[in-house]
Image (cartoon, rainbow, N blue to C red):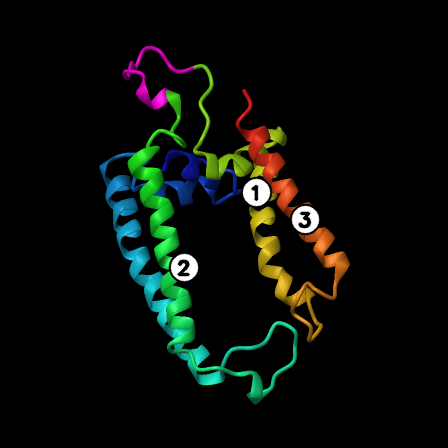
Amino acid sequence: ATVITNLLSAIPYIGTTLVECICGGFSVDKATLTRFFAFHFILPFIIAALAIVHLLFLHETGSNNPTGLNSDADKIPFHPYYTIKDLLGVFMLLLFLMTLVLFFPDLLGDPDNYTPANPLNTPPHIKPEWYFLFAYAILRSIPNKLGGVVALVLSILILAFLPFLHTSKQRSLTFRPITQILYCILVANLFILTCIGGQP
């Protein structure tokens, strides 16, 4: 909660007021924890409702073919083909997660989590969890606080503009080598930023 609210404080003019409204005071307190707990409790229900709306629209219009070639002869029923495929995917994912949790519980953990808490001794290198390291690298690479926040927001919002930049009826990457190269650069960039974010 502290990191996110500190990012909002970088917004000119309204940043401090916005942080006070979200936190319910001048610092992280009981009101902040209550608000964030309520938000994290309600968020899964909002996501589930949006998923149901998405399925309703998908059922109404039908799914599109990524190659842009739509033919009734190529269509197959959802059940049992996709039902079994989805169940197999869920089973494989659960198998992977259960293997990770039951046999390798410390694999993705931070060693600092196992040191006894001492308020007088802060660990020398504090870093976020591995899935936030790319954002941490972006924030750390720009010395200006507002510039870092703008770069972080733009790095996420660029994905929202991709549907507007793509105007071809061909949605598959098979026939577009430049897009394949850009996609590989994006994945490599994310991986490099994650590695950099974990460095002291």
Give the Cα separation between the discs numbered 2 and 3: 25 Å
Mark 1: amino acid: Leu
Q: Earlier in the sequence, mark 3 or mark 1?
A: 1
Q: What are the residue bounds of the magenta stretch?
A: 112-123
Label 1's element?
helix
Residue 184's disc number: 3
Give the percent coordinates (x, y) of residue 117: 28, 17
In screen coordinates, is 33 left or right of 151?
left
Which residue does the image show at 62% across and 54% down from the upper left?
Answer: 158
Residue beneath label 1, please?
A: 152
Camera-side residue of 87 and 5? 87
Mark linked to residue 89: 2
- CB-based contact (under 8 Å), mark 2 and mark 3: no
Q: Quadrant of the N terminus?
A: top left
Residue 113 belongs to the span the image colors magenta: yes
**Secondary structure at numbered mark 3:** helix
Q: Nearer the viewer, residue 194 or 117?
A: 194
- The residue closer to the viewer here, 116 or 6, is 116
